[in-house]
Amino acid sequence: MKVLAFLAAAYVALLTPDFANAGMLAQAQQYKGLHEVKNNKTLRAALGINPARTPWCGHFMGMVARKAGRSPPQSFGIARSWLRFGAPVKLSYARPGDVVVVRTGRGYHVGILSMLSKSTAQLIGGNQSGGVRVSQFARGQVVAIRR
């Protein structure tokens, strides 16, 4: 039974990336509102790390990808590693559910595209002001979009 479930997840992830990405967005939204301190026990159990002490946007994305039947990058806990996830997508073709890596000062952040406007990308992700929430990033901060 587990083999059949694995093969079905692989089929969805490889042959229908739009459906798989929509699954990632839906998974992420289930955690919306959780905070790294107030909901530490819940997030700790889901992520396998203490989010109050560890940068966790990549860990959150890894959990979401696995729950949606996708394979996260090997070093999924590092936001920059998501530059190698899935297939690249041009900004003009980005859709809700795509994985977006943004530049934040000297570092990177990763989240799932919720909405794209002429000037901003709204991402849902972990470690955004200490919680799982939707945050806005300037389109100029977008480094990569992956599907």
Image: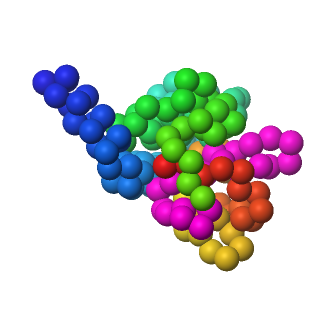
In the depicted structure, whether residue 120 falls above or below residue 130: below
Q: Is residue 28 above or below residue 56?
A: below
Residue 92 lies in magenta, yes or no? Answer: yes
**In what quadrant of the picture does the N terminus appear?**
top left
Find residue 84 and report its horizontal and vertical position in percent.
59, 36
Q: Does the magenta-highlighted stretch encompass residue 107?
A: yes
| Residue sticking out furthest to the right | 106
> What is the magenta range?
91-111
Which residue is rendered at x = 63% and y = 39% of the image?
A: 83
Looking at the image, which residue sits at the far bottom? 118
User: Which residue reaches farthest left?
Assistant: 1
| Residue occupying the point 74% across, 43% down | 108
Quarter of the figure with residue 40: top right
Q: Residue at x 59, y 67 (%)?
A: 92
- Closer to the camera, 115 or 40? 115
- Tell me where residue 130 appears, x and y as whole percent: 67, 46
For the image, the number of numbered tags is 0
Answer with left or right where residue 78 lies relative to residue 95. right
Q: Is residue 63 visible?
A: yes
> Which one is in front, 43 or 70?
70
Query: Residue 138 versus residue 89: which sits nearer the camera?
Result: 89
Q: Position of residue 19 (x, y in %)?
A: 33, 53
Percent across and percent down for residue 87 are 51, 44
Above or below residue 46? Residue 16 is below
